Amino acid sequence: MTDLATKPTTPTAAPARSSGAGTAWLKWLARRLGLAVLTLWLCSVLVFFATAALGDPIRAILGKDYATSPERVATLTAELKLDQPLITRYLDWLGGLFTGNLGNSIANGLPVSQLVGDRIVNSAVLVLISAVVMIPVAFGIALISANARGKRTDGVIQIIMIVLAGLPEFVVGILLVALFSTTVLHVLPAVTIAGGGAPPWSKPGSMILPVLTLVIAVAPYVSRIVRSSLLEVLDSDYVELARLKGVPERIVLRKHALLNAIVPGIQVIALQLAWLAGGVVLVEYLFSYPGVGASLVDSVRNSDFPMVQVLAMTIAAVYVGVNLIADVLSILFTPRARTAIAS
């Protein structure tokens, strides 16, 4: 009788637990999304008021004609809504970010959304190709270095990684141009060439140096972090137990060490990819790559504040989005974190 009475209560416990875990996950995701939105709003405040504090944009645009062209001053004042309170201008600009009404470029009068669309795609392709090349290279270097711990190979790799990590990306780019695009070898173009409105990847050879520059600038950081995580895992008890059972070292590295060291790797990859969103500015300008970075430099030079604001918010959105994805992946790859959220 006791067994029969307790049997109906057994299957009802699992759905309740599953429902509670799902609710916990939704709450955690909602908090992270809320923090991401709050961060982007703070970025919008900083971007807008920082550009507004740079001075009179009309004086910067007209230069010497400011005093002699009152008609153009009045036209630009009405176009940029400078006759309205600063808070009103910010709210209108913030609403435009949500509706896609980003205003017109001061430099050429074209809609900002039309100008930045292709530039964002070009930069996204450059960063994506760099990431696809960088991630396996960095993990491969980390595996070789960790497997050769204490040997000459490991020492040489670490010296090279430290030297490369200490070089700014524009120095790396200049060195690559001097090596592959001048009288030394002269096998690759020094700038990105894509005529007729074609995308830059229509000529793959012109993208090799920008991609190589970004890979060299980022890979040393990723490989060093992953190597440290691998060494920590390789010294753990369960890895020693696997070795005592006769598991080959390559399988220990691949199945035991690498899988447990992937979470720190995800975090550092996310940080480096987020850095690429801003660090790509110098690389694109150096190689005349038609992306967000080159457009941002040109907009600052031309005092094109609507373009500067939109491009800066684009970089901020990429930074926040990449870190949000990294947080989710880290939780999914960490059993303890999943259990803590579900409970």
Image (cartoon, rainbow, N blue to C red):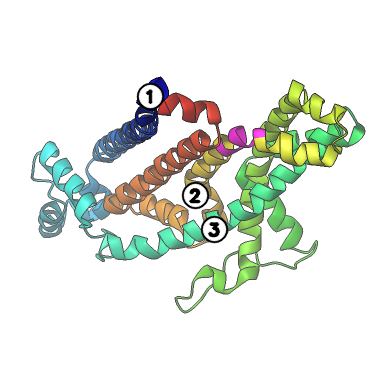
Task: Give residue 190's quadrant in the image.
Answer: bottom right
The residue stretch that appears in magenta: 260-266
Mark 2 surroundings within 10 Å by alpha-carbon count, few (fewer than 14), some (14 through 19), many (20 or more):
many
Name the residue carrying label 3: 126
Q: Which mark is residue 6?
A: 1
The Cα atoms of the two marked residues, 2 and 3, are separated by 12 Å
Q: In the rendered structure, which amino acid carries the disc numbered 1?
A: Thr
Q: In the rendered structure, which amino acid carries the disc numbered 2?
A: Val
Q: Nearer the viewer, residue 207 or 229?
A: 229
Q: In the rendered structure, which amino acid carries the disc numbered 3?
A: Leu
In terms of secondary structure, what is the magenta stretch mainly?
helix
User: Mark 2 or 1 closer to N-term?
Assistant: 1
Secondary structure of the residue carrying tag 2 is helix
Mark 3 surroundings within 10 Å by alpha-carbon count, few (fewer than 14), some (14 through 19), many (20 or more):
many
The residue sitting at 79% across, 64% down in the picture is 185
Horizontal side of residue 33 vs 109, given as left or right: right
Name the residue carrying label 2: 281
Task: Give residue 220's quadrant in the image.
Answer: top right
